[in-house]
Image: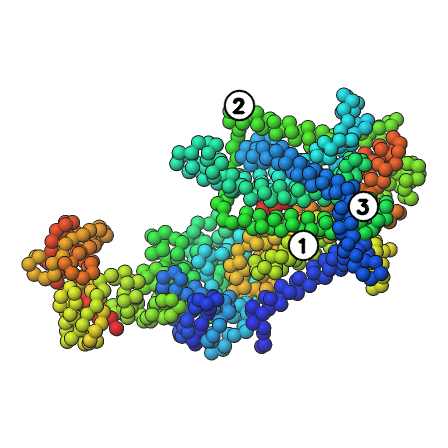
Amino acid sequence: MVLARPEVTCGALRVGLMVLPVAFFAVFFAYPVAAIVGRGLKSDGIWQFGRLGEVLSRPDILDVLWFTTWQALASTALTLLIALPGAYVFARFDFPGKQVLRAVVTVPFVLPTVVVGTAFLALVGRGGLTDELWGLRLDTTVWAILLAHVFFNYAVVIRTVGGLWSQLDPRQEEAARVLGASRFEAWRRVTLPALAPAVAAAALMVFLFTYTSFGVVQILGGPAYTTLEAEIYRQTAQLLDLPTAAVLTLVQFVAVAAILAVHARTVRRRETALKLVDAAQTARRPRGAGQWALLGAVLLTVVLLLLLPLGVLVARSFGGADGLAYYRALQDAGAGGGTFLVPPVEAIGNSLQYALAATGIALLIGGLAATALTRRAGRLVRGFDALLMLPLGVSAVTVGFGFLIALDEPPLDLRSSWILVPLAQALVGVPFVIRTMLPVLRAVDARLREAAAVLGASPWRVWREVDLPLVRRAVLVAAGFAFAVSLGEFGATVFIARPDNPTLPVAVARLLGRPGELNYGQAMALSTILMAVCAVALLLLERIRTDRSGEL
Amino acid sequence: MLRLDGVTVRFGARVAVDAVSLDVADHEIVCVLGPSGSGKSTLLRAVAGLQPVDAGRVLLDGADQAGVPVHRRGLGLMFQDHQLFPQRDVGGNVAFGLRMRGVSRKEQAARVAELLDLVGLPGAERRAVAALSGGEQQRVALARALAPSPRLLMLDEPLGQLDRGLRERLVVELRHLFGRLGTTVLAVTHDQGEAFALADRVVVMRDGRIAQSGTPLEVWRRPASEFVARFLGFDNVVEATVSGEAADTVWGKVPVPAGSPQGGRQVLVRPAGVRLGDPADGLRCTVEARTFRGHHVAVRLRPDAGPPLEAECALRDAPDEGAVVGVTFTSDEVVVLS
């Protein structure tokens, strides 16, 4: 019987697991992005790095960079300001309907950015609710963008900070109180330091999402406000100025890589030993007028900021003669004046098919990568860990356009294949799968695996018998996130979805780009359907939520 | 059964197990005893194949285990904190090893029932492991390790986390059980009481090396070195020059048993061999402290010269703190260390 030494098997196994994810990212991420950057910066086979300086000294580009940065900073600050009291309330108070409310605040996060934009348009835009009531329009100001960003990222803070907060042992604070600290002093000296890394991690995630914001800005920004990502889209798709787009892509790449590097460092610090307890033990019913007032304020915020836009969106989708005219028009390709080659309602089927395929791909790639990354190892693996997050921040527009120009030759001529869209969507889903599964896999005690091995389980059976049952719930949660994210993916899909096969977000954006009440109404109706699909997926998830899936 | 031949395990520059050679015979219960960090747990992991061996060989039934992966070694290992599978019930845990060996469902059920009976938890198959007490988890872990009839059962601090009363009861049960089943056992512990009660043979480890090996009685009666003596809780160790049946020490002449090694040595006086009497005869000592230990009193003495001494005496004979006494030694409680 000739068998490899165990440590050799283990190393080989890990390399084997990594082959597919690495190949996937090389072919469908690095290659298209490199191709488009090359296309922009190379002429006659010579790199034109001078263009970097040229582009970056243009005043209009500097304006975009400045706006992108300050709106991301402002959005992050505003999100923290509004969501941190919410995190406290969700962590420490017990009140009826808390579980439902937790699910409700998470809905916006998985909503397609296009829907978020549309919802705020219906609330504060031209002919929107506030316009009708008070003549107040925010869609030409930066406030609409900021509010939409808060709406979108509220759940990030609640889940990341609130999740940890609810598991902090209150007795630590009590110990400080007994030692003579006042209530505030105890919070500042004991709870805050424990919480700080989580707050930093959440802030960085929010900053990342708002820095690369596209769908929201595309719909609410107008010509006055443009982020880097929206500008890349404009340069690529409308002005066909590839060199400028390539430079902007590089700028965004560097910025995102920097944010992710800081984030990885912060997360590692968060993993340092904290005394965690079961969240169910730390929540109490609010006591005293102050605490009830805080709870009331948080609930009011949730209603005004999160529920109202969605409510208005749904309300606006019902219109016309009998209230269902917009929904009926979705079944007719010609209703909006020839916007589509097919009835818009077909976008639902397309989206679901694409999203399912993308979820499958994301689970396979993400699952393999997470399994390989489970055992903490050297710098190389940690670096790879951070690398897998890059697709979250790298310009989706670039990826989409890169697909078109890079994957058009045999053996990889996928331009006419339907798989192109799910592949692009899976790129965004994979980081979510890894982020959800990795903490759970890492929390599995290594000695549990050893116990199984000593009892005669081969490495494959150890995985099946020990790891899989413990992470099954996390896999389902990861699948739900990947599904919702794929469903809402807009930046890349807008390039590669074929006109006769639009996805829901693409169809919504196209409808909004056309004049006329019917198109507007149809956009609202389609957004409502998209929201309903996402919300159902999420509510199913919330039933099987694991406590350790709180990294995103 | 098990033979370790110069087994060495290194963690970077640190040598955790240093050229250890050890034999365990069929049906023998061997207990490796040592303080934490002495390399005893690493030794177990090396035998199980969980820790690669840097040098030396591990042989089971004469077959070199290099290259044999963990799951093909056919061993049983009971972890310090049990490591029961949380998502399975008691029956599922105990049946795990049988399932891995492809035993039929019917045989599995019969064997699980038999083992739960054996460890004193009959009919517990459907209970959740999270609902078990520490002692019950212990029993389930034992049943799980025993179920596939391993050729060698290894126990890592088997009773470490249980409270004292339960520990003392279980250790007796375990020895009885292993004797009945004829199990070959290699256990590690830092608790000498546990080791002495459980083992046929005790192996004391220090810094990755074997400091002494012998029956519990041998080790207890004749610690091989100052380290073993102190680890067993004996602190009355002093430099001495032995000639004939007397040793010359800072405490004065100490009688030693006939046939003791001669020359410059260390001498151990067990507390029971320290007799307290009138200050006029023997070594003059001041009583520093007395500690009530139930059936006796431990008295800490400060001699006029030399290291402090510990004596054991009956409650009614115990002098008060601060009293001055004279100390004499009895030779049958004195050991000359080699």
* SS under mark 1: loop
Residue indicated by mark 2: A289
Which chain contains the residue that carries disc 3? A
Rendered position, B305 above or below A105: below
| Residue at left offset 45%, top offset 56% | B81
**Residue A26 visible to the viewer:** yes
Few, some or many residues within 10 Å of mark 1 (<14, 14–19, 20+): many
Q: Is residue A397 visible?
A: no
Residue A388, numbered circle = 1
Q: Are marks 1 and 3 on the same chain?
A: yes
Marks 1 and 3, how far apart in space?
Answer: 23 Å
User: Of the residues tagged 1 and 3, which is closer to the observer?
Assistant: 3
Identify the amino acid type marked 2.
Ala
For label 3, count other residues whose C-alpha is less than 10 Å away and answer few (under 14), some (14-19) or many (20+). Answer: many
Left or right: B276, with B20 as reference point:
left
- Rate crowding at label 2 as few (under 14), some (14 to 19) or many (20 or more) other CA atoms within 10 Å: few
Q: Quadrant of the C terminus of chain A?
A: top right
Query: Which SS class for mark 3?
Result: helix
